[in-house]
Amino acid sequence: MTYELDSDKNQLTVTPIKSLDGTVTLPGSKSLSNRCLLLAALSDGETRVENLLESDDIRYMLEALDTLKVPVARDADDATSVTVSGGRSD
């Protein structure tokens, strides 16, 4: 990642990266689970999301992604894990 700091304007410009790969572990949370699903849907490629909070709100988000035809593969052995295939479908 590169960045440029313009002290005169009190501005930091960060150059976008092409890809990101790794693991982020967050505590189970309704808000974080929903945000993670939404970001996965907007990202290009596949995102594995584990430890989703089991709640009505998360089920509604998964149903919304289904309605929007965002591919979401549910893990047959773990109800708290999904793989989201995000990106634009032109």
Image (cartoon, helix red, strand yellow):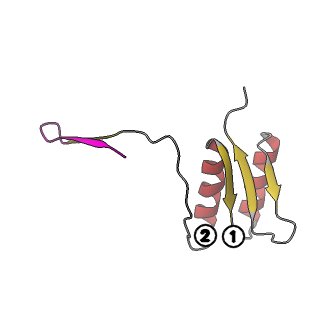
User: In which quarter of the view is residue 35 placed?
Assistant: bottom right
x then y, percent, for residue 29: 60, 69
The dominant secondary structure in magenta is loop
The three-letter amino acid code for the residue at tag 2 is: Ser
Q: Which mark is residue 4?
A: none
User: In which quarter of the view is residue 62 placed?
Assistant: bottom right
x then y, percent, for residue 83: 74, 56
Q: Residue at x 55, y 70 (%)?
A: 26
Q: Between disc 2 and disc 1, whose residue precedes?
A: 2
The residue lying furthest to the top in this view is 90
Horizontal arrangement in the rendering, residue 6 relative to residue 35 (left or right): left
* Label 1: few (<14), some (14–19) or many (≥20) C-alpha neighbours in 10 Å: many
The residue lying furthest to the left in this view is 8
* Label 2: few (<14), some (14–19) or many (≥20) C-alpha neighbours in 10 Å: some
The three-letter amino acid code for the residue at tag 1 is: Leu
Q: How many marks?
A: 2
On screen, residue 63 above or below 24: above
For label 2, the SS is loop
- Bounds of the magenta span? 1-10
| Callouts 2 and 1 close, C-beta under 8 Å | yes
For label 1, the SS is loop
x then y, percent, for residue 53: 69, 70
Residue matched to label 1: 53
Q: Residue at x 74, y 68 (%)?
A: 55
x then y, percent, for residue 31: 59, 62
The C terminus appears in which quarter of the rendering?
Answer: top right
Closest to the observer, 24 or 30 = 24
The residue lying furthest to the right in this view is 76
72 falls in the magenta region: no
Task: Determine the CA span between mark 2 and mark 1.
Answer: 6 Å
User: In which quarter of the view is residue 10 placed?
Assistant: top left
Residue matched to label 2: 29
